[in-house]
Amino acid sequence: MQRRRHLAGVAFGLAAYGIWGFFPLFFRQLAHVSPIDVLCNRAIWAFVFVGLLLTLRRQWHRVGAVFASWRQLSMLTVASLLIGSNWLVFLWAVANRQVVASSLGYFLTPLVNVLLGLVVLKERLNRMECFSVVLALAAIVNEVIAVGSLPWISLFLAGTFGTYGLVRKQLPVDAVSGLWLETLAMLPACVLYAWWQAGNGHPVFTGHDLTTTCLLIGAGVLTALPLIAFAAAAQRLDLATLGMLMYINPTLQFVTAIRIFGEPLHMAQVFSFGLIWLGLLVFSWSAWGKYRRVP
């Protein structure tokens, strides 16, 4: 029974990170649509789809509990701004052939989480964790020296997603209810943007061909599905296994960028990725050691 539960958790985890990993392939089909238009449609349709899920699963009471706390509402609004801006920059990266940079950002995220734990939560780092952070910083310095500027896409994606995780960690809200509330917080900005664009003769939600309309609706559905699968995996797997699976997402993005999109990979980037991968290996070894020591 326990083995079956573990295998189901692995299957859910593979589904979640696999869908996230192939997001560049899906959203490249919408490269002819402005990234902010895609973001607005993604938020609207995710809001609708998750609302239907909450209705079918009779879980609206979880959402109602959040409205009773101004602190939780304000933190969810911050989370919405963080994940919304993360989505927007990711969509821009996909549309502008910068998927290698976006994959680097998601590889960096676990190391950013370590740094946030040190700075914000005042957590103490062991030597291996410190070394992993130093390797990440060395990779960033290498990018600056080689390119002449900060890898802003990678840093923004890692920073916003890491901070988003930190904020959500403080909230006793499940993933599905949280997503509905986050997209709810995005709606005023999306509606205002659509109204402004309509005044300029550019409809955001209408006027697309059938294929594009289906893809835009699908974007909302695909936003929710991996979160549901991830929540199911988290219930069945230990943190160490879940942590190992998380590298599937940026790895698939990286392979997609190189092998399918044909994005160039310079030697300086190879060196940066090497430093990040080494840092992740050190970090994962340290995390596994901590997990094994827990009684």
Image: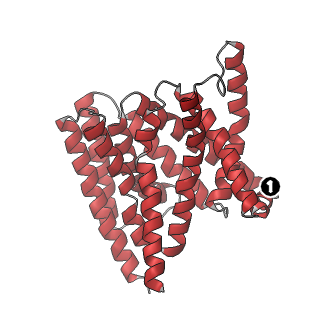
Is 113 positioned to the left or the right of 288 in the image?
right
Q: Residue at x 72, y 14 (%)?
A: 199
User: Residue 40's x, y, as percent?
Assistant: 63, 33
- In this rendered view, identify the residue nearer to me: 9 or 192: 9
Q: Residue at x 63, y 40 (%)?
A: 43
Kindly indicate the quadrant of the structure image that contains residue 240: bottom left
Q: Residues within 10 Å of mark 1 (few under 14, many from 20)?
A: few
User: Residue 278's x, y, as percent?
Assistant: 24, 56
In the rendered image, which residue does mark 1 sit on? 67
User: Residue 178's x, y, as percent?
Assistant: 66, 55
In this orientation, does residue 262 appear? yes
Is 244 positioned to the left or the right of 58 in the image?
left
Q: Is 7 located above or below residue 149 in the figure?
A: below
Q: Is 130 located above or below residue 87 in the figure?
A: below
Is 64 positioned to the left or the right of 54 in the image?
right
Q: Residue at x 57, y 29 (%)?
A: 36
Q: Secondary structure at mark 1?
A: helix
* Amino acid marked by disc 1: Phe
The quarter of the picture where the C terminus appears is bottom left
- In this rendered view, identify the residue nearer to me: 23 or 239: 23
